[in-house]
Image (cartoon, helix red, strand yellow):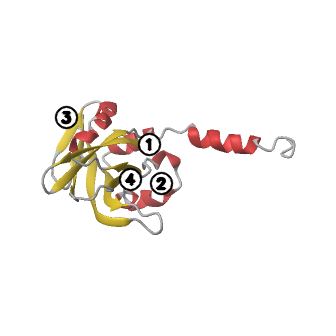
Amino acid sequence: MNINKYPYSCLIFVWLTFNCQAENIVTNLIFKQDTDNIIVTPQLEFSTSNEIKEAIDNGIRIQLIVKASLYEPRSWWFDNTISHKYIQLEVSYYVLGKYYVILNKNTDQRVGNNNYSKLWSSIEKIINIELPKLNSKNTWVKLRVMLDKGSLPTAMQLPVLFDDNWDIDTQWFKQKVNSD
């Protein structure tokens, strides 16, 4: 194929390659406010590959990190980060009960299901991040979910760095905090 004859064909191929993969995304952030804090709960479209399911089924506990930052954007310089927090989640499988569990290691909350696919639809129930409330009208929150590859067994860490099946991280999702 002559690239000069079809200059955009390579770009279309690259675009299709990146867009055909299943992506994990944060679709929305729900805010609950009290006098001092904002509690952020994400709505997610989240799934994993067969390789991750197989690792969990074989007794490997998968760690996820949920990061959130409260900030005020600036057009002329870096954003003013006011607060940031993260929570750790652990996904495991209990063979005797044939039961999958996601544990929020910060609050000790758990959700479980005997169906692996349905487990991921309930992950939002245990992700509640508390950030300080501000009186500013221009306050935003950004949030993402990442696989903690460093917590995997040592023999797995290097191979999963280059394996797309283990790339389940979401992009940063930014949303303005609705002021009450």
Q: Which of pointers 3 and 4 lies earlier in the amino acid sequence?
A: 3
Regarding mark 2 in the picture, which secondary structure is present there? helix
Query: For mark 2, what is the residue?
Result: 160
Q: What amino acid is at disc 4?
A: Met
Regarding mark 1 in the picture, which secondary structure is present there? helix
Q: Position of residue 28 (x, y in %)?
A: 35, 41
Residue at the spot x=63%, y=38% of the render?
Answer: 16
Q: CA distance from mark 1 to mark 3?
A: 22 Å
Query: For mark 4, what is the residue?
Result: 146
Q: CA distance from mark 3 to mark 2?
A: 29 Å
Q: What amino acid is at disc 3?
A: Gly
Bin the neighbour count of mark 3 within 10 Å (Cα to Cα): few under 14, some 14-19, many 20 and up.
few
Numbered badge on residue 97: 3
Q: Which of pointers 1 and 3 lies earlier in the amino acid sequence?
A: 1
Q: Which of pointers 4 and 1 lies earlier in the amino acid sequence?
A: 1
Q: CA distance from mark 4 to mark 1?
A: 16 Å
Query: For mark 1, what is the residue?
Result: 51
Q: Which of pointers 3 and 2 lies earlier in the amino acid sequence?
A: 3
